[in-house]
């Protein structure tokens, strides 16, 4: 690469499949300011992109930031890869993305939920008409001592917010709901939750009462 010359075939034969993959694609590999990119033309838009050839150590971080964050929206495999390809590439990126998404707690949870609720589709008329709230966990503790995820989703827009929590008691759940969600998005008309004691607590009921939010919940015999 330094000399700008392609190594010969025999030299490459002993290297990993990844190296051989790039060797075959040599004419599209460029180096700009010490960083290696691959030239790539998007078929549909015919737009040219320079994809960063991502080093192995930050692959996971790249996938996470493109899939897991509140702003990336937990897209499926195809959409996630489409989005990532505009900026990044690495050998077998699609496969890594697939594995990541198949193991994504939030995607798995919402997938199971969708198939179970089958009969009822709550896609009502406007944003904030109906918002669902749920706590996932316990999960492995993070460095910041969080073990739970508070997931709040708008049933109409399908926008989802996720907040890490150290525990799942009613006070912290209510605090996050008001200070993080309501302050940014507004007060929902209806709030749907499961049987969780945090959502059925006096404190949480009081908060909903003051804000005039109608609470609904899944019934014990027909859990959604
Ligand atoms: Zn996901």
Image: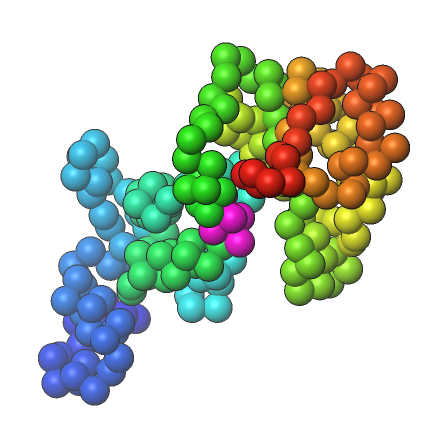
Q: Residue at x 67, y 16 (%)?
A: 189
Residue 142 left/right relative to 128 = right
Return the residue nearer the eye: 148 or 190: 190
Q: Residue at x 55, y 44 (%)?
A: 69
Return the residue nearer the eye: 108 or 87: 108
Q: Which residues are magenta?
A: 105-110
Say which quarter of the image contains residue 118: top left
Residue 128 locus on image (x, y percent): 61, 18
Residue 205 left/right relative to 10 = right
Question: Quarter of the image containing the C terminus?
Answer: top right
Q: Residue at x 82, y 32 (%)?
A: 204
Question: Relative to 133, does residue 142 appear above or below in the rendering?
Answer: below
Can you name the residue that lies furthest to the front here?
A: 221
Question: Relative to 57, does residue 107 appear above or below in the rendering?
Answer: above
Return the residue nearer the eye: 190 or 180: 190
Can you name the residue that lies furthest to the left here?
A: 9
Question: Relative to 144, does residue 57 appear above or below in the rendering?
Answer: below
Q: Is residue 107 magenta?
A: yes
Q: Residue at x 62, y 34 (%)?
A: 218
Residue 20 locus on image (x, y percent): 20, 74
Residue 53 left/right relative to 70 = left
Residue 89 left/right relative to 153 = left
Say which quarter of the image contains residue 54: bottom left
């Amino acid at each position: 690469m330094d000399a700008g010359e392609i190594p010969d075939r025999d030299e490459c034969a002993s290297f990993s499949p990844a190296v051989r993959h790039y060797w075959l694609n040599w004419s599209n590999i460029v180096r700009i300011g010490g960083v290696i990119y691959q030239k790539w033309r998007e078929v549909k838009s015919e737009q040219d992109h320079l994809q960063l050839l991502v080093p192995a150590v930050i692959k996971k971080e790249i996938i996470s930031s493109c899939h897991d964050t509140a702003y990336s929206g937990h897209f499926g495999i195809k959409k996630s890869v489409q989005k990532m390809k505009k900026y990044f590439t690495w050998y077998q990126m699609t496969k890594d993305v697939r594995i990541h998404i198949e193991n994504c707690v939030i995607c798995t949870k919402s997938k199971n939920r969708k198939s179970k609720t089958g009969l009822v589709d709550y896609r009502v008329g406007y944003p904030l008409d109906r918002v669902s709230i749920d706590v996932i966990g316990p999960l492995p503790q993070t460095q910041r001592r969080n073990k739970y995820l508070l997931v709040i989703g708008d049933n109409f827009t399908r926008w989802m917010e996720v907040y890490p929590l150290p525990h799942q008691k009613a006070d912290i759940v209510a605090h996050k709901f008001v200070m993080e969600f309501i302050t940014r998005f507004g007060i929902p008309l209806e709030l749907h939750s499961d049987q969780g004691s945090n959502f059925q607590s006096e404190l949480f009921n009081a908060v909903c009462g003051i804000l005039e939010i109608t609470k609904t919940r899944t019934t014990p015999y027909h859990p959604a």
